Amino acid sequence: MVVVLLLMALSSLRAQQLSESYYRENYSWIDPEWWADESNPYLLRETAGEAPFEEFAIYGLSFIDYDYRGSSRFSRASLLGVLPIDNPLERYGNFNLSSLLRSLPHSHTYSFYNSPNHTTSHPSAEGFDPSPSTLPSKSKLRVGLSSRTYNLSTSYSLVAHPSEQFSLSVALGGRAGRDLAIEGLFSERAHLWLAGEWRSGEKDGYEQSLTVAFVVVPELRSGRSWNTQEVFDLAGNRHYNSYWGIQNGKVRSSRVTRTALPTLYGEWNLRDNIILTDLNVSALISGGRHSRTSLEWDGAPSPSPDYYAYLPSSFADPRVAAEVEGVWAARNLSYTQIDWHRLHHINALSDSGSHYALMSEREDRFSAVGELSGTLLGARRVRVGVRGGWYDSHNYNTPADLLGGGRLGDGVETYDYRVGDWRWAIFSTFRLRSAEGELSGDVELGSEGMNYESLGAKPRLGDESHTTFRGRVAWSRGVGDGHLGLVAHYHHTAPYWESLFAAPEGRMSRNPYAGGVDWVGGELNGNYTIGPLQLHATLYGDYEWGGATTELFWDGLSSTYASIMAGGLEQLGLGAELSAQVEPLEGVSLEGHLSLAHRFYTDSALADIISYDDGMVIAEGSDLDLAGLSSSVAPRFIGALAAKYFSPSGWLFGVEWAVAMGRTMEPSLLFASDYLLSANLTPEERSALTQSVELGSASNLDVFLFRRFGRLGISLSVGNLLNDTEGYSGGYRSSRVKVTSNDHTQRLLPYAPRYRHLYPRHLYLTLNYEF
Amino acid sequence: MSFRTFLILLFVAVAVAGCGYDSHSDVEFPSKDATLSFPLSALRESAGSKVPFAEGTSIGGVVVANDLSGNFYRTVVVEDESGAVALRLALYDLAALYPVGCRVCVDAAGLVAEVRNGVVEVGWPADAWNSDEVRAIEGRHEIYERVTVVSPEREDVVPTALTVDEIALRHYGCFVALRGLTFQGDEEDEDVGSEYWRTDWGSTYYGSEADRLFVDELGRFVLVRTSRYADFAEQSIPRGRMSISGILYADRYKGADVPVLKIRDLSDVQRER
């Protein structure tokens, strides 16, 4: 309320109401797509309009771990044309392709929650239109400097229209470098984009076009560890990264991800002005490899410098603890980071194979997706279609580096399995507009199947299928100087494939509690204009039941690796979002955002716990006391203020501040189980296991500056200007219990949670040259 | 040079310069100069004095036993031509760090030695309230810095063949082989028709170690001591006469001194015809 009053007060300074068209007319040189990439997303949001809080949240909250509305279901699907580029079997995401597409000179179409376009299982999608015909001819060269993850980037893009029927776009480039704040982080990336479009022009009442696009983004990047607060304190560094060490004077990371997934997309459109409004046939094929290295060991001391048994807190003798603290204080890299040389030496002494090995966890993926859709005769707003997809992932690990050993040690675990997913659906969307309002919706009925095959020493085969249904209806109506909208949806989907199995790397035991998942929800939204002030407000709620999950952990009670297979998870999400935008002065744009949200488990669930090695049941039908526990790390309160200034001389300045409060780590299913809680626990032990772990608040201030000088444009953005790193960007609880015995008394205490601190101040400087 | 040309060259520079973050050269095993202060037999003289070794004191030898099977908990036994010593090291998987046959050098400054069950043990001085005189060295930095492997070469480790009569003070802690031993099982232990006794090497209701009574060809007692946590503890003892190798300890049985063997694994047990 205070924010609203403040904005209204400011608006009184200037009576003139400024519209978006004013900016388009007077500041047409600010072409958002020209600039938008992950380094300066502020201009990207110029194109937003229908869901301002969602647009803010996607980029403005990137300083914390955040799923919009606390659930990955609300994260945007990425579409190339009309087809999703995400592979449902991927374990680690394909973010580099999305971020590249966002930086290309292509029209960005945003399909929001109330979009008339069909979507995937997500209510919101971000679409990238590959058709070069919609873009003006231009060539651009971009050079960027960065302090985060990479240092130097260049890219060249070209859009040309050699004839009336043909258009093409090309983009290629690369970036590389090291993170200047966090040791052990580096990346190398190249990209190639080729797209061509042929248009027939109108002939005999119809016209058609064919677009073919190819994109590949090979990338290599290293990772950053999660650590306990004890380790951050020992290292004296909030950005301590345990994944690296020195080898022959050079930084070497144990966690390196490589991705190369070439993607080919084709789309044929036929517009028939007599029979069908349009017909669309699209196909997407993608295949390649995603891999991640991981340092594995067997029969030797842990190579991790932050292994709990190496830390002062593990030593009962305070003298030893003090010595260990001294080693960290002295920054002895042989002990505070991975000692690659010692790992090699130990392997050289072994006659039973490498005790340590850098394993490459690989996913060889293939996906083929296609869609046929068209608009019905005479009903210009009704669209029907059929969509199908086939996804395959061969997951296995193989030695990437034996670290001086002759062969892999017998105790180092290997795995080899294949998962396939096929799906098809028929769908229909409609959109009806009248003077009073709009009614839209979509419905989709289909089937999804999975087949899985363990190819290792413990063969297992299986397949299953599930009927799927998605339905959504949205209604909006003009009310005075605004709109009021109502949306409702229901999904019945197949379980996520990783929730089907415990230990897919090993026994591939089927989770008996995993089945179809149901999700129902809705929202009431509205926007209203009061003079120069635009208000957007949303109330939403959603309920999910039938959720399932699996987790591998070390069971301190049975002293063995075990898997927990849980199901019957029920979650309720409720929230309210408020956004306000005002342009009180010429060239000045202000906006504010507020969100209150909570997502929590509504009931207990069930789980089985089995041994990882032999599948023996350790606990069957264990009750998980989850009711009331927060099920998401998303903040319960979010507040943000942003201001932009467009000066008549051509400067653009922006500043944005955001704060996130009320964050709780997701609970450990093991700690909520009666398998653990039925042990003889003291009140202190029970409290330590069951109490929620708060992440505390976090805030962030970003600034942005842009100027164009003829063909040359320069932008500078500084993230976390105040260098506030005390708060946490995220954290998680380990499902591991420390079991100690003293005087015939057994004590159970949870291991310390792990965190990442907020990323420090960083900058991006970008030069764009058009010729 | 035009600005456009400059930018194009910069483009090429990124493509060239952005390589090599994850390529690494091989690691060589460092050679270490092992200058020892005195032979291991000299440790027995200072054992029990509670006087820490002076700065610069180094001892060394070849590893003859470690914790691979779990029978030598937090212990590495090192032997030279004169004798042997058991290093008390509070770390797991010592067998990977100090495999049998590798030569090690130990920085003994500040450590003390004591004799327990006939074997010289070296570690940190125990606290005054502790009846033990030696406690295991803790902290991997301490262990790694003090106990270093001299070279990756592995030497053959052959037990010294002895009879009970030939056992001398200098043999305690060493890797020896006693021949002609037979397990002294009774009727309940017999598994008629089997090549094995019902009794296994390490199961016990009392304490963490089990003793098994053997006799040699002249009827002299020899105990074989096994930890209940050894990976062979539940393996049955073979019937018949056998040669058993292991680290030699001393203890008393029925009022008399008896030799005690701790085997490293079941390959130390060889049936004799």
Image (spheres, coloured by chain):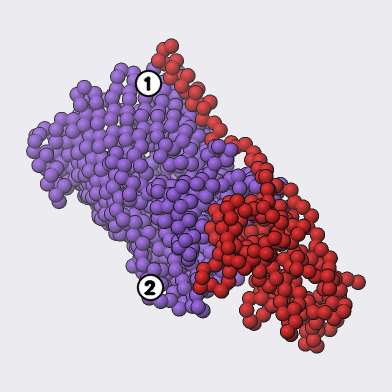
Chain colours: A purple, B red
* Percent of width and height locating residue A50: 27, 43
Residue at 51%, 52% (x, y): give it.
Answer: A305
Q: Are marks 1 and 2 in contact (CB under 8 Å)?
A: no
The quadrant in which the C terminus of chain A is found is: top left
Q: Residue at x 21, y 22 (%)?
A: A649
In the depicted structure, whether residue A753 falls above or below residue A55: below
The image quadrant that residue B198 belongs to is bottom right
Where, by quadrant of the figure, is residue B221 drawn?
A: bottom right
* Three-letter code, disc 1: Tyr
User: Hey, which residue is sitting farthest right in the picture?
Assistant: B273
Residue under the point 41% across and 68% down: A689
* Residue at which label 2 appears: A684
Q: Amino acid at mark 2?
A: Glu
The disc label shown at residue A769, or none? 1
Image mark for residue A244: none
Label 1: which secondary element: strand
- Vertical arrangement, residue A189 with respect to residue B197, above or below: above
Front tag of 1 and 2? 2
**Chain of the residue that carries numbered disc 2 in the rendered image:** A
Residue A650 placed where, x, y %?
24, 23
Residue A12 at what x, y percent from top left? 8, 38
**Mark 1 surroundings within 10 Å by alpha-carbon count, few (fewer than 14), some (14 through 19), many (20 or more):** many
Q: Residue at x 55, y 55 (%)?
A: B142
| Marked residue chain, label 1 | A
> Where is residue A185 shown, x and y percent of the image?
47, 40
Gap between marks 1 and 2, in whole Å?
64 Å
Q: Circle 2 — which element? A: helix
B85 or A437: nearer the viewer: B85
Nearest the camera: A120 or A446? A120
Relative side of A98 to A575, left or right: right
Q: Earlier in the sequence, mark 1 or mark 2?
A: 2
Residue A211 makes an appearance in the image: no
